[in-house]
Amino acid sequence: QVQLKQSGPGLVQPSQSLSITCTVSGFSLTSYGVHWVRQSPGKGLEWLGVIWSGGSTDYNAAFISRLSISKDNSKSQVFFKMNSLQANDTAIYYCARNGGRSDFDYWGQGTTLTVSS
Amino acid sequence: QIVLTQSPAIMSASPGEKVTMTCSASSSVSYMHWYQQKSGTSPKRWIYDTSKLASGVPARFSGSGSGTSYSLTISSMEAEDAATYYCQQWSSNPPTFGGGTKLEIK
């Protein structure tokens, strides 16, 4: 069955960076894109970016200067990195598989991030 | 970016009651998608391409709409339907989500 499992730290200091790995199973990264979405009480669900099956990326313009998404198809892993974190980046970060047309059909369990000194 | 406004923000329904929640887009969109989220869990695909039920979603759920107005309807409320429902569009970049409708059981 399709699964996305996330790993990454829960606490980061201000100005530091966040790295999360999304390891997928049940499908190939050469066939599906993987998105990153975050959820916070203040801003709700926000789409951050996507890495497509061919390896190209698209980013939300609001985060493009400090966001990077890459992948290793052979390891079925997608890598998310966001720099220059501030307190308002505190949120739950999700990876999610691209659905058939324009939605997200399977989601990871989420990585709860707190940005605090 | 397209702003999605969901209403009501919070609602409650009795078992067996018909439930309708709406999602209004600031510009016309081609399709609307819906997710169900229960406390402490990830969102789940619930309705996609406006009216298609995701795998495992009970037939009492339905979706409809076009242009700037979309809705999710439950024909007969059940306790397990209590959750927060989010709409989402990707007719234009970036994809955006509504603020959610929290549905509670009376």
Image: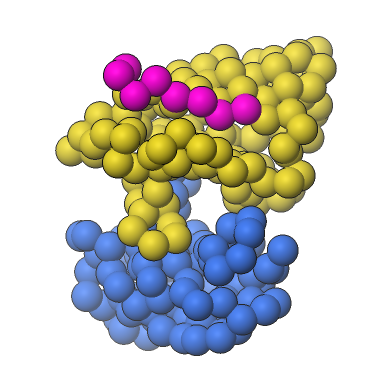
- Quadrant where the C terminus of chain B is found in the figure: bottom left
Residue A46, placed above or below residue B21: above
Which residue is more in the foreground, A41 or A48? A48
Q: Is residue A67 magenta?
A: no
Residue A83, placed above or below residue B69: above
Number of marks drawn: 0
Judge from the rendering whether residue A43 lies leftward or rightward of residue B79; answer left or right.
right
Judge from the rendering whether residue A93 lies leftward or rightward of residue B106; answer left or right.
right
Task: Read off the magenta span.
Answer: A68-75
Q: Do we see residue A107 in this rendering? A: no
- Quadrant where the N terminus of chain B is found in the figure: bottom right
- Indicate the position of residue B41 as horizontal and vertical percent values: 42, 42
Judge from the rendering whether residue B48 lies leftward or rightward of residue B59; answer left or right.
right
What residue sits 39% from the left and 62% below the top? A101
* Displayed quadrant of residue A5: top left
* Displayed quadrant of residue B46: bottom left
- State the blue chain: B
Q: Do we see residue B45 in this rendering? A: yes
Q: Magenta span: helix, strand or loop, mainly? A: strand
- Indicate the position of residue B98 as horizontal and vertical percent values: 61, 64
What residue sits 51% from the left and 38% below the top? A56
What residue sits 74% from the left and 29% below the top? A66
- Indicate the position of residue A58 as horizontal and vertical percent values: 59, 43
Which residue is more in the foreground, A11 or B9? A11
Question: Which tint is chain A?
Answer: yellow
Judge from the rendering whether residue A43 lies leftward or rightward of residue A75; answer left or right.
right
